[in-house]
Amino acid sequence: MGVETIRKPADTRVAVKPAFDLALRMGDNALILAQRNAAWCGHAPALEEDIALANVALDLIGQAKLWLGYAGELEGEGRSADDLAFLRDGREFRNVLLVETPNGDFGQTTMRQWLYDSWHHFMLEGLKASSDERIVEIAEKSAKEVAYHLERSTDLVIRLGDGTDESHKRMQDALDYLWPFARELDVADDADRAIAAAGIGPDLASVAEKALAYRSEALSQATLTAPTDAVPRKGGKAGVHSEAFGFMLAEMQVLQRTHPGVKW
Amino acid sequence: MSEHKRKEWPLWEVFVRGQHGLSHRHVGSLHAPDAEMAINNARDVYTRRSEGVSLWVVPADAITATSPGDKEPLFEPANDKVYRHPTFYDIPDEIGHM
Amino acid sequence: MYAQKVESTGARPKSLDEMDPQERAFQERIDANIKIEPKEWMPEGYRKTLIRQISQHAHSEIVGQLPEGNWITRAPTLDRKAILLAKVQDEAGHGLYLYCAAETLGVTRDQLTEQLLSGKAKYSSIFNYPTLTWADIGAIGWLVDGAAIMNQVPLQRCSYGPYSRAMIRVCKEESFHQRQGYDIMMVLSKGSEEQRAMAQDALNRWWWPSLMMFGPSDAESVHSAQSMAWGIKQDSNDDLRQKFVDQTVPQAEYLGLKVPDDDIVWNEAKNDGKGGYDFGEVNWDEFFDVLAGNGPCNAERLGARVKAWEDGAWFRDGLMAHADKQAARKIAA
């Protein structure tokens, strides 16, 4: 990233890097989760679900555009949201591993969405108090959409957890598999600490606490049990992704990579 | 497909209030396991283009309708009651809007 | 069209004199452009033909999600990705509206789905062709949606109320579908040499299948005559096809692309002297072959729908079971 070299007035230079990091992380999470969800279009278990999940993906693509567009501006090297989405290599992406996990069955996709929503919602609440006005704007717009994402995914997790034996088992399996990945959202790295220190974003521990309380309540209604001894599966924030991620990017970026520099 | 007959999600009729102050209007139907999910599905299916401010869902089988044969006795008497229609009355222009 | 070969009763339409009083009253209402609504008396043939037509239309929307859906994960920009996703999502919505319209005639959506998945019900032949490049997404929007709209606009006036209302909603929502396709074609045809070639190749591959969408000539068809008498089909297949060619050839010229038919020539005498294009003969053997299941993607398309349905059974059942439990708890409380 070229951010370190940006020439800005002394009083803003400090906050530019954390704001860029924050925008990139939020944008990459939204983009990659949207990309995963969008693959269900035409293949979901019921027409109503097909439409609903596409709505979530559409919201997330819109959010990714805003976050990545702002990241590009902060970087100041003329990169657009599309440049950031389609012309970076895997090691440069900053999304958490959770959002890139494969779709699995529809239960796994639902559980992944819920784990992200239940963090995303409280994260955006925190970002509404950011010292950066643009971040506040994007957070406020996104929060309205995400409040509904969370309502819907929570409802599905409770219903499927407390549904049939089979749906219960599938949701418990999905929770066991994904819970360690969700913990990457809670573990602050240096960039997260700089973001919080600059007043750009909330302290991740406080977000984690709210998310955990929310999840516990829903899981008890869902008759599901979160693993207690899960070691965080992390790496995405540092650009160390899963093997599956490379294939996903190859697919997503194929046209821009094959035909560089043209309009679409 | 399935060996045993699975239970199909019931059908719901969806009504949308397009703007504040207007009545709910029937826009279509959908399937959902229960009322809460029907509301969520209705939001996703029928207000994708921000068409509404309020939603109703009603189980399709809970609607009692006039049977087509009733048409004459139920609706025709009203046709005589032209006095229920504002245009029945001639109000002089000087009175202004009424 | 989306319902390409809908069999009706197989008999020529009856004249009013041949009908019993009930059927005559029904036909007179249709002739007077009064909509037929669910639960009103209707001839059994009308009901069955409508179920076939509406469900074929619905199946086509659902299967039609697949060829374009292929490219959602590969769309070249964030805007194109959002537009394509919204469009394919609309197709799911349109399938949903149409199934609901069919359900007012006394079938359930699950029954119609089973007919599709067992191969018993038909869907439009067009969706059995593969989407090989990004330009195919442009060509489908421009040509396939263009052809579909041509058929769907008159269906807004069809005699059956729920179908007519579903089509009004579909047409309103679809207005952007053809335009986004043509927009892709405009960008590609003004783009790099590879992009231009991609656009021309897509036109070459989608042109003839698009003309087939209108179905074979039905000038002599008793099925069509009956459907027209019932007000569930407005125009002949040949008329719509001619209209489509007349509209589309100049659009291709504007793009600087060549329609893959050497027989295309302007004919002043056509369309009652208003002029129109002569064009070559559609390869109907190919059409019937694709309809019979031998198109390039028939097995894949149906396979994808069967997989979605079977893999999703536990999900649908789980939600239903929860709803039943909740209802029981409410009664117990």
Image: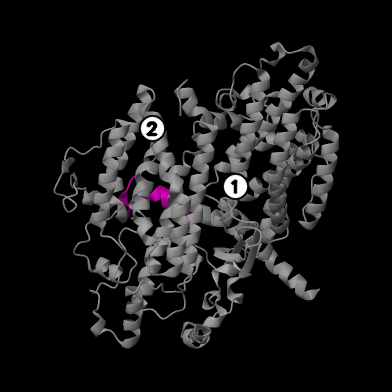
Question: Identity of the amino acid at label 2?
Answer: Met
Q: Which residues are magenta?
A: C293-306
- Towards the viewer: A211 or A143: A143
Q: Is residue C303 magenta?
A: yes
Q: Which mark is residue C328?
A: none
Give x and y (percent) for residue C76.
49, 31
Chain letter of mark 1 equals A
Do callouts 1 and 2 mark residues in contact (Cβ within 8 Å)? no
Q: Main secondary structure of the magenta part?
A: helix
Tally of numbered tags: 2
Q: Is residue A46 magenta?
A: no
| Residue at 61%, 29% in the rendered image | A243
| Residue at 28%, 48% in the rendered image | C244
- The residue wearing badge 2 is C186
Q: Secondary structure at mark 1?
A: helix
- The residue wearing badge 1 is A55
Left/right placement of residue A53 relative to residue A25 reads: left
